Image (cartoon, rainbow, N blue to C red):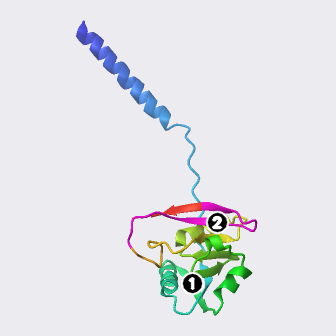
């Protein structure tokens, strides 16, 4: 009698478990994939003479299929002012792609996402010079962030990188 109860309980648990897992995967919405800009990207990077990390960032982008036109300028702050880059997101170089500002050591995937999504912002930035961002290439295990910034001086988190 004990064996019959045990087997009946085991079968009921197996059936319940199977039904649970079957229902877990039915009618689940497929997550929307992030749009990715897969067209050719050309950007113009403005930097000061002698900025080696700017050159390294440009090389990183070129290695990832982005055409980079490098412009050395005597007054980089004037470029930032002209394009509406607030001081809080300022970095060592400013780039323009499809009318968007790309400020600092922004990873290529953020640039592609920005161009695909086309949000109503001025651009994207990796403020400061995080040591493990593209072009800096100092191996540390520290997160850094990209942010979007707009004409109303709103700054919002965009992406997290390691």
Instruction: Determine which of the numbered discs, if any, sits on residue 89 in the image.
Output: none
| Label 1: which secondary element | strand
Residue 19: percent from left, percent from top? 44, 28
Tell me the residue that label 1 is attached to: 67
Whether label 1 touches label 2, CB < 8 Å: no
Disc 2 packing (10 Å; few <14; some 14–19; many ≥20): many
Question: Which quadrant of the figure has residue 80?
Answer: bottom right
Q: In terms of depth relative to the viewer, which is nearer, 50 or 58? A: 50
Question: Is residue 32 something that shows in the picture?
Answer: yes
Rendered residue at 38%/72% (across/down): 139
- Looking at the rendering, the stretch of residues picked out in magenta corresponds to 139-157
* Left-right relation of 39 to 1: right
Seen in the picture, residue 72 relative to 103 is either above or below; the reply is below
Residue 161: percent from left, percent from top? 48, 64
Compute the Cα span from label 1 to label 2.
22 Å
Rendered residue at 49%/77% (across/down): 64
**Lower sequence index among marks 1 and 2:** 1
Residue farthest to the front, as pictured: 87
| Label 2: which secondary element | strand
* Left-right relation of 39 to 121: left
Question: Is residue 42 something that shows in the picture?
Answer: no
Seen in the picture, residue 74 relative to 33 is either above or below; the reply is below
Query: Any magenta on residue 154?
Result: yes
Seen in the picture, residue 8 relative to 43 is either above or below; the reply is above
Tell me the residue that label 2 is attached to: 148
Q: Quadrant of the C terminus?
A: bottom left
* Left-right relation of 77 to 67: right
């Amino acid at each position: 009698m004990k064996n019959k109860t045990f087997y009946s309980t085991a079968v009921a648990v197996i059936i319940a478990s199977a039904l649970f897992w079957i229902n877990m995967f039915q009618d689940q919405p497929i997550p929307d994939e992030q749009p990715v800009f897969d067209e050719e990207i050309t950007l113009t990077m403005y930097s000061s003479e002698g900025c080696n990390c700017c050159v390294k960032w440009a090389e990183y982008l070129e290695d990832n299929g982005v055409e980079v036109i490098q412009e050395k300028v005597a007054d980089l702050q004037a470029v930032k002012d002209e394009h509406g880059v607030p001081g809080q997101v300022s970095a060592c170089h400013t780039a323009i792609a499809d009318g968007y500002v790309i400020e600092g050591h922004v990873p290529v995937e953020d640039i592609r996402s920005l161009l695909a999504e086309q949000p109503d912002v001025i651009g994207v930035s990796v403020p400061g010079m995080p040591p493990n961002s593209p072009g800096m290439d100092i191996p540390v295990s520290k997160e850094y962030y990209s942010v979007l910034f707009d004409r109303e001086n709103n700054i919002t988190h965009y992406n997290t990188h390691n």
